[in-house]
């Protein structure tokens, strides 16, 4: 896509994530809500605002696995199992990435990092629980904006590995 056309779409309310979905013809539903900066959890806020079960709303986290940034997509109802994430990508040790590095690398701000349309494509692991739902919600690229799509489409678009990386 031409740079000017991409910028035009983003200025019209699109984000790199929604632009990527539209460009591939992937079916999705966009959900927006008023973000409250005082809310203690971006993901739980999204689930509450949309009236969606927290098991169907997934947060996007960036971790460092043996020196390589890796994206983990897990339900907001739980947390990320760093050992399981490392094992899923053939690594030995994982730690959470520095938030500023995650923002620079993905092109998104914390609380709005989407697994789609990232500035630099990173290895991605989607928690296996996603496959138990017909659709899941992930950040659409900014706080207060979520995209609902099938886990199969998300896996395909991000070349994600499906693995049990979340814990309740």
Image (cartoon, helix red, strand yellow):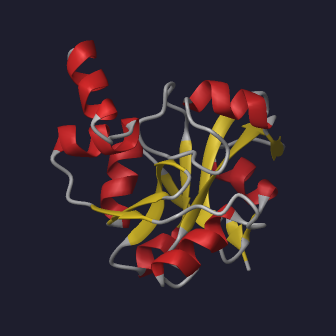
Q: Quadrant of residue 11?
A: top left
Foreground of the two, 77 or 36? 36
- What residue do we see at 77% from left, 37% from top? 99
Q: Position of residue 104 (x, y in %)?
A: 65, 25
In front of the other: 89 or 127: 127
Residue 63 showing in the rendered view: yes
Position above or below: 116 against 137: above
**In the image, is 48 to the left or to the right of 1?**
right
- From where the camera sits, is residue 68 visible? no
Which one is in front, 59 or 6? 6
Vertical relation: 132 (above or below) 118: below
Q: Is residue 78 left or right of residue 145?
A: right
Q: Where residue 152 appears, x then y in whole percent?
A: 33, 62
Residue at x-position 39% and y-position 54%: 155
Q: Residue at x 15, y 47 (%)?
A: 25
Q: Which residue is outermost to the left?
A: 25
What is the count of numbered marks? 0
Quadrant hosting residue 41: bottom right
Q: Position of residue 2 (x, y in %)?
A: 21, 15
Locate the C terminus by quadrant.
bottom right
- In the figure, is residue 135 to the left or right of 65? left
- Quadrant occupied by the N terminus: top left
Q: Left or right: 155 with respect to 102?
A: left
Residue 112 on image: x %, y %: 57, 48
């Amino acid at each position: 896509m031409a740079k000017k056309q991409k910028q035009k779409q983003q200025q019209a309310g699109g984000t790199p994530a929604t632009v990527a979905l539209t460009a591939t013809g992937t079916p999705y539903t966009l959900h927006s809500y008023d973000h409250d900066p005082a809310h203690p959890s971006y993901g739980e806020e999204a689930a509450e605002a949309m009236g969606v079960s927290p098991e169907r709303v997934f947060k996007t986290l960036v971790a460092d696995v043996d020196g390589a940034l890796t994206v983990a997509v897990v339900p907001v109802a739980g947390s990320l199992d760093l050992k399981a994430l490392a094992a899923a990508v053939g690594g030995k040790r994982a730690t959470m990435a520095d938030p500023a590095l995650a923002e620079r690398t993905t092109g998104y701000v914390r609380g709005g990092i989407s697994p789609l349309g990232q500035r630099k494509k990173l290895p991605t692991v989607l928690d296996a629980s996603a496959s138990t739902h017909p659709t899941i919600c992930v950040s659409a690229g900014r706080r207060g904006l979520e995209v609902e799509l099938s886990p199969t489409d998300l896996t395909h678009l991000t070349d994600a590995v499906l693995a049990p990386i979340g814990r309740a």
